[in-house]
Amino acid sequence: MPSYTAETARALVRGHQVHRDVYVSDEVYRLEMRHVFRNAWVFVGHDSQTPNKGDYFTTQVGDQPVIQVRHSDNEIYVLYNRCPHKGTKIAIDRQGNTGKFFRCPYHAWSFKTNGCLLAIPLKKGYEGTGLSETENGQGMKAVGAVHNHRGFVFARLAETGISFEEFFGDSLSSLDNMIDRAPAGRMEVAGPPLRYMHQCNWKMLVENQTDTCHPMVAHESSAGTAVKLWVEMGNPEPRPPAMQIIAPFMSSYDFFENIGIRTWPNGHGHTGVKGSIHADYEAIPGYFDAMKDAYGEARAKAILDENRHNTVYFPNIMVKAPLGQLRNFIPLGANKTLVESYVYRPVGAPDELTTRSHLYNRMINAPTSIVGHDDLEMYERAQEGLMSDGLEWVDLHRLYEEGEDFSVEAVDNGTTERQMRNQFDAWAKFMQDTPGPAEAAE
Amino acid sequence: MSTPTRDDLIDFIYAEARMLDDGRFEDWLALWMPEGHYWMPLEWQQKDPHSASSYLYEDNFMLRLRVERLSAERTFSQKPKSRCNHVIQRPFVDEYDPDANRYITHTSMHYVETRLDEQQLLALTARHELTLVDGALRIANKRVDLLNCDAAFGNIQLLP
Ligand SMILES: [Fe+2]
């Protein structure tokens, strides 16, 4: 087993192929947690999960346990979930309200909701000891930077680095389209996410989001059988919900070639440049009127005519704008990934929209979903197959061109693997040493 | 049967579990009323299936699709097939209303599902809404609450 550094790990990416160690090596996993997830802007949560002062919610940024909390200034803060004293996690439950301060359950050190140290019992015992001159004496550590984009909260662990605007650039148009689909121009989280455990590397899931050559193959068992059943029933109308949601997975190669794939710099990209499998859902009564009242007819039409399929935000989320969904691929190890699939309610729209999103969520993203079963079977077979020493490289040649430039936006044939190559290009770009405490810890 | 006894209701619940364990899914589908739903909530004590996500809220089409898929030629996640086993406690009869032709049972069970080297155990309660049609009991609706509904799961491919 070679010993990797950030520099040698970058050599595992060759554009048209990547070495299997990016999926299976624990060492490469630790490097990507320390560098890629530290330098990139990573999704944390939605601010409606913490609507009131003192509300908090716990999650991970890469492998780092963090707390998203609303402080007394009404701003969202993201703090490492660790007491500066002995390391105890400050918040264990997934969400709650902590009032005006956090209090460590072990020795009662307390902190303001922006992390600043508030009080330590028997403080005298620390006088003149030098604690106040250390980082631990300041309180709970905050992440390097936080950005709240219209309710969606992102964090950069590194204190310095690429700005939010530069990192995402024009890719924010997908997230904005999702939010614009709410007549009130904002969304709210609609219940807890579906949580689905995968025994595979997180990148397999992210790549699958723009893999348009797999649905008609891997999902033949679910989508193909749905179509067959429906035909046997004599093509009844209205089509059952499963037909509207699952059957389009059987769309032809032609269909997917034509809808196109767009890539943006820094590893972001989406399928469905011209239409998508979400374009033919039934209209919901009252929705267009609400949109028209909010935006005027022309703008409302423009928002709803944009039917992007899956938008990948590097490194590890996917947004489905027409359905108000976000999937968070949380890495738990080289071969373990937790997928959290959220539904957001478009404020001002009829409830039926959210009902349909929940329907889609359970049909596609649940551990009980037959479509999910199809996919997970492939990921886990790949994770096991990659242990083979027969071949060491994973292929990404589909519609590859020598000298691809990912620093510019591009639109391509919808079956290209360009977006996967784009992700690995960004992976190598952000696999860089960063200044700060994470380095000192090595 | 013109009116089921309490024992008839309880026997029905046992027989249904046996069908699933034996893999007699076509027989199992025939137990269902066409308008019935199989609901597995995501949240503990979830109020309704529409305002939050659920694990399952299957109509008749989806139940048939699930069963059909299990034996389809290219169902790779069922090569090899999963097997399941229900260990059920004697059901409570929570509602016994022959006049309304409505019977509700509440059953605690341990559900085991296995495939290859993996085996998972789910503790759950099933709430059956039953009704009598042409002398035979039918499932009007079924709700299954997982004890650890807030945990993250791998594949759950068969049905408790
Ligand atoms: Fe898929």
Image (spheres, rainbow, N blue to C red):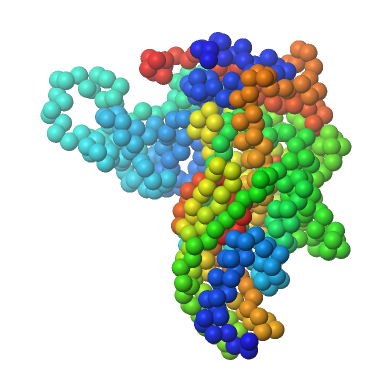
On screen, residue B128 above or below A298: below
The correct choice, above or below, for A210 with respect to A196 in the image is above
Q: Quadrant of ligand 1?
A: top right
Decide: is A221 above or below A391.
Answer: below
Residues A267 and A408: in front is A267
Q: Residue at x 37, y 42 (%)?
A: A92
In the figure, is residue A26 to the left or right of A380?
left
Above/below status of A257 relative to A441: below
Closer to us: B131 or B52: B131
| Residue at left offset 74%, top offset 57% | B68
Residue A441 visible? The answer is yes
Total numbered circles: 0
**Residue at the extreme left:** A124
> Where on the picture, by quarter, is residue A430?
top right
Location of residue A308 (image quadrant): top right
Outermost residue toward the top in this view:
A7
Q: Can residue A287 be seen?
A: no
From the viewer's perspective, tell me whether residue A424 is left or right of residue A339.
right
Residue B28 position within the rendered picture, expressed as x and y whole percent measured from the top left: 66, 67
Q: Position of residue A97 (x, y in %)?
A: 37, 48
Residue at image position (43%, 28%) is A143
